[in-house]
Amino acid sequence: MGLFDRVSRVLRANMNDLVSKAEDPEKVLEQSIIDMNEDLVQLRQAVAKAIASQKRTQQQYNQAQSQANQWQQRAQLALQKGDENLAREALVRKKSQGETAATLKTSLDQQTQQVDTLKKSLIQLESKISEAKTKKNMLKARVQAAKANEQLQSTLGNINTSGAMSAFDRMEEKVLELEARSQAVSELGGHDLESQFAQLEAGSDVDDELALMKAQLSGGSVEQQALPEGAETEGQSSEGQSKSEVDSELEQLRSQLDQL
C-alpha cells in the first residue's frame, strides 16, 4: 500500500469520525425530510412535464389519424368522380399521415408508460415522506427522552448521596456519644451526691469521737455537754462529791505517813 493511499485512508477515517460526532439526530432527520420534499417537488415537475408531453403527442396522433382518414375519404371521392390521378395523390397523402400517426402512436405508448412509472414513483415517494415524518416524530421523541434520561443520570451521578449518608451516620454517632456522656455525667452526679452524704455522715462520727476524746481528757463527757442546764448542775454536784472523797483519801494517806 502506497503512502498516498494510507494518508487518504487516515484522512477519510478522521473526516468520517468528525462527521459522526457532529451529527445531531434531530437535525439530520429534519434535513432528510427537507431533501425528500425537494425530490418530491422535482418528481412532480417531471410528472407534469411527462403528462404535458403525452397530451401533445396524443393531440398530434389524433390529428394525424384524422387527416389520414380524411385523405382516405378524398381518395374515394376522386375515384367516384373518375379522377384517378387525384385519387392517387390523396392516397399518397393518406399514407404519409398514416405513417406519422403510427410514429406518434409509438411515442405516445412510450410516454404513457413513462407517465405511469413516474406517477407510481410519485405515490411511493409521497408515502415514504409520510412514513418518514411519522418516524421522524417518533425518533425525535425518543431522542428527547434519551437526552432527558442522560441529563437525569448525569444529575444523579453528580449527587453524592453516599457522602450525605455518611455525614448522617457520623452525626448519629456523635449524638449517641453525647447521650452516653450525658447519661454518664448524670450517673456520676448521683454518685457524687451519695458520696457527699456518706462523707457528711462519716465526718459526723469522727467529730463525735473527737469530742468524746476531748471530754475524756478534760474530765468531762460528751453526754454532759449535751445535757440540759439542770442536769449539768447535778453533774457538777456529783463531781464535787467525788473530789471531796479524793481529798479524804489523801488526808488518810498523809496521816499514815506521819505515824511512820
Image (cartoon, rainbow, N blue to C red):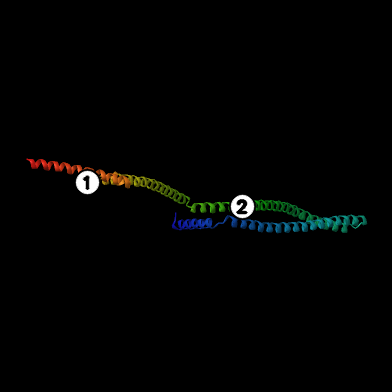
229 or 216: nearer the viewer: 229
Circle 1 or circle 2, nearest the eye? 1
Residue 235: % across, % down: 27, 44
Q: To which quarter of the image does residue 58 belong?
A: bottom right
> 127 or 101, which lies in front?
127
96 relative position to 45: left or right: right
Q: Can see residue 66?
A: yes
Q: How many marks?
A: 2
Left or right of residue 25: residue 182:
left
Q: Is residue 258 above or below residue 127?
A: above
**Viewer-closest of 156 and 35:** 156
Question: Crowdedness of circle 2 by 10 Å Cα count: few (<14), some, many (20+)?
Answer: few
Q: What amino acid type should be assigned to the residue bearing mark 1?
A: Leu
Q: Which residue is mark 1?
A: 217
- Label 1 Cα neighbours within 10 Å, binned few <14 / some 14-19 / many ≥20: few
Q: Residue furthest left?
A: 260
Q: CA distance from mark 1 to mark 2?
A: 112 Å
**Label 2's element?**
helix
Q: Quadrant of the N terminus?
A: bottom left
Residue situated furthest right in the rendering: 81
Q: Provide residue 241's location: percent of width, then percent of height.
A: 23, 43
User: Is residue 227 shown to the viewer in this render?
Assistant: no
Question: For the residue marked with disc 2, what is the amino acid?
Answer: Ala
**Secondary structure at numbered mark 1:** helix
Q: Position of residue 102 (x, y in %)?
A: 78, 54
Relative placement, left or right, of 119 versus 168 is right
Q: Quadrant of residue 39?
A: bottom right
Residue bearing the label numbered 2: 141
Residue at position x 72%, y 53% in the image: 119
